[in-house]
Image (tube, rainbow, N blue to C red):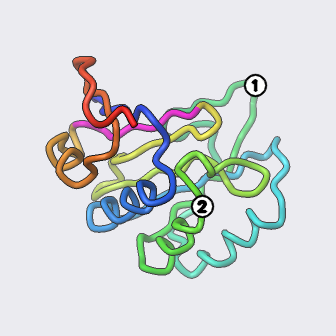
Amino acid sequence: MARIDILREPRGPDYRALLRFMTPRARSFSLVWRHQLRHGPSADAIHARMEPDLLNVVETAAWPGTVLYGGELALVRFYRVTAETMAVLAEASGLYSWRVPERPEDLAFYGEGDQVLLGSIAHERDAWFEAGMIAEADVRASLPTLAIRVADGSDLGTDA
């Protein structure tokens, strides 16, 4: 499936605008707790705060944009999109703040049928929309300061 790459990390107001953009479009989101990484108490506190909206936990070696090798596994926790869970997500300073040890990793959003809408790999500073699930025109209209690159390689957005 084609991607719409996010060229620069959404931070501060741009990150919160991204969360507002995803809220009506997404049914759920996931965060990752890798077994081989050491998570701080704040990562556990995030899960505890969102646990009432926990939908599912999967122990896996793969999630959007990532495949682990060598027998490594992670817990991928899926949460319902609610005002409460989005408020917890909004406490981060930016999309790539979802990294150990302070937080779980790799925030991703899903639509109906668990189709990926937005994926991220925080430590690689990589994020994207799935173009078949999120319309480029909607991104441009709703998030005008978000710099993106569509599948054909053209750049859209601001250079600031």
- State the residue at coordinates (41%, 54%): 14
The residues tagged by marks 1 and 2 sit, at their Cα atoms, a distance apart of: 31 Å
Q: Position of residue 105 (x, y in %)?
A: 64, 49
Quadrant of the rendered image containing residue 44:
bottom right
- State the residue at coordinates (57%, 37%): 62
Q: Nearer the viewer, residue 134 or 143?
A: 143
Q: Residues within 10 Å of mark 1 (few under 14, many from 20)?
A: few
Q: Is residue 126 magenta?
A: yes
Residue farthest to the top, as pictured: 153
In the depicted structure, whether residue 125 falls above or below residue 97: above
- State the residue at coordinates (69%, 25%): 69
- Residue 117, which numbered label? none
Magenta region: 125-131
Q: Residues within 10 Å of mark 2 (few under 14, many from 20)?
A: some
In the depicted structure, whether residue 41 falls above or below residue 51: above
Q: Nearer the viewer, residue 69 or 91?
A: 91
Mark 2, secondary structure of its residue = loop
Q: Which residue is mark 2?
A: 92
Q: Nearer the viewer, residue 17 or 68?
A: 17
Q: Position of residue 73 (x, y in %)?
A: 71, 41
Q: Position of residue 138 (x, y in %)?
A: 17, 49
Quarter of the image with the N terminus in it: top left
Main SS, magenta region, reads strand
Q: As shown in the figure, which amino acid type bears the numbered disc 1?
A: Gly
Q: Position of residue 64 (x, y in %)?
A: 48, 39
Q: Which residue is mark 1?
A: 70
Q: As shown in the figure, which amino acid type bears the numbered disc 2?
A: Ala
In the picture, measured across the screen, residue 155 lies left or right of residue 96, that is: left
In the depicted structure, whether residue 123 falls above or below residue 46: above
Q: How many marks?
A: 2
